[in-house]
Image (cartoon, rainbow, N blue to C red):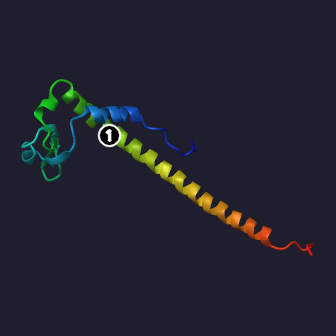
Amino acid sequence: MHPSTPPRPDLDGIEARAKAASSAPWKACKAEDCFDNWPVCPSMGCDDEGQQWAVSTDGVRASEFQGEGAKADADFIAAARQDVPALVAYARSLEAQVEAERERNIFLGAELETLRAETRKPHPEAP
């Protein structure tokens, strides 16, 4: 691992939470507008304009929310606050490593061309 690479996120855990949560798509909507679908996470507060927001499914059947479904959605939403920044940091560090390797390959390619050109030159002692 590159010294500046953040720890690898728990991809298995993130994937398991995503699979256990209700089907996509979800949407953010004004609280009064999104209860035509199934509310996943009603907001407990309001924004600066006094608007209450919620997370809602977009056409998911209510049967998906029975039993462990509600807890799985809550676990997914709660973990997203840590999972998303960890995934972004990891992806950005990998992008930086890829870019560094690309630049290194460009440099090595130029060095190789220089060496090839030098080997094509006639040797000064050659007849």
How many numbered circles are shown? 1
Q: Amino acid at mark 1?
A: Arg
Residue at screen point 24% across, 30% down: 72
Q: Horizontal and vertical percent for residue 28?
A: 18, 47
Q: Mark 1 Cα within 10 Å, few/some/many (few <14, many 20+)?
A: few
Q: Say if 14 sits above or below 50 in the image.
A: above
Residue at screen point 15% across, 26% down: 66
Residue at screen point 87% across, 72% down: 123
Q: Is residue 51 left or right of residue 75?
A: left
Residue ranking furthest to the top: 67
Q: Say if 84 sits above or below 114 in the image.
A: above
Residue 8 vs residue 42, the one in the foreground: 8
Residue at screen point 70% across, 63% down: 112
Residue position marked by numbered label 1 in the rendering: 81
Q: Quadrant of the N terminus?
A: top right
Q: Horizontal and vertical percent for residue 110?
A: 67, 66
Q: Horizontal and vertical percent for residue 23?
A: 21, 38
Q: Say if 62 sits above or below 57 in the image.
A: above
Residue ranking furthest to the front: 127
Q: Quadrant of residue 21?
A: top left
Q: Quadrant of the C terminus?
A: bottom right
Q: Say if 45 sits above or below 95 in the image.
A: above
Residue 120 vs residue 31, the one in the foreground: 120
Q: Quadrant of residue 111?
A: bottom right
Label 1: element kind: helix
